[in-house]
Amino acid sequence: MQTMGDRTAAEWTGEFERTGRVEFPLRRGAFAVRTVPFLVLILPTIIWAAAGMANDVPLAWLSGALGVFGFTIGAAGTAWQLITRRPVLIVDADGIRLARRSIPWSAFVMAGDPSGRAWFRYIPLKAVPGQARDLRIGPATVQDLDAFSHWLNTLRDNRRTNQDAEHG
């Protein structure tokens, strides 16, 4: 199923003009590709610890308990995100919001160029210091980070031009 993050900037603009907001739910495939391998890497530790637990090795009991706890928390958190498709990135008349963090348009400086390695690329959303905290948007939310960065900067410029026309 295609999400808004898989679509084009023209479709984002159309949705924004039609409804006044664009919601970008978590892209399950992109999120799973980045998250599930880490959970799989924990499994050998749990297996090693279980073997040691069978031999009553104290360090293995501690390692096993921590491994099972960490794996359970990680798997539950990953499953919750995959099922609910959260966090959802919302761009609306108020600004940009990801989960509980937001940047109002009045504090939005710019969307930077994508950076980071292939699997961990992101775009920084810069805010005015002291007014809001910067955000990072990655491929688990939007597939085409270059287009998304350009779209947000264009949206910001259009909003400022409209506000200047209204007040000028």
Image (spheres, rainbow, N blue to C red):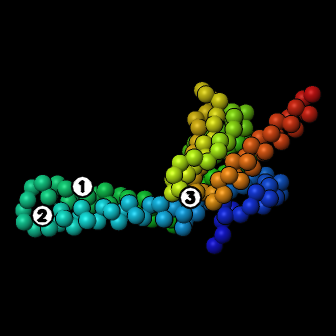
Element on which disc 2 rests: helix
What residue did someone put label 1 on?
66
SS for callout 1 = helix
| Side of 133 where 20 appears, left or right | right
Which image quarter: residue 109? top right
Residue 142 in the image: above or below residue 106 = below
Viewport quadrant of the N terminus: bottom right
Mark 2 lies on residue: 52
The disc placed on residue 140 is 3
| Location of residue 37 by image quarter | bottom left
Image point 53% across, 56% down: which residue?
A: 118
Question: Looking at numbered disc 3 in the image, what kind of residue is underneath it?
Answer: Ala
The residue mark sitting in front, 3 or 1, is: 3
Residue at the outermost bottom position: 1
Location of residue 4 in the rendering, given as x and y in whole percent from the top left corner: 69, 62
The amino acid sitting under disc 1 is Leu
x and y, in percent, of residue 55 in the image: 7, 66
Indicate which disc, 3 or 1, sits on the residue closer to the N terminus.
1
Of badges 2 and 1, nearer the viewer stands: 2
Question: Quick one: 80 or 54, which is closer to the camera?
Answer: 54
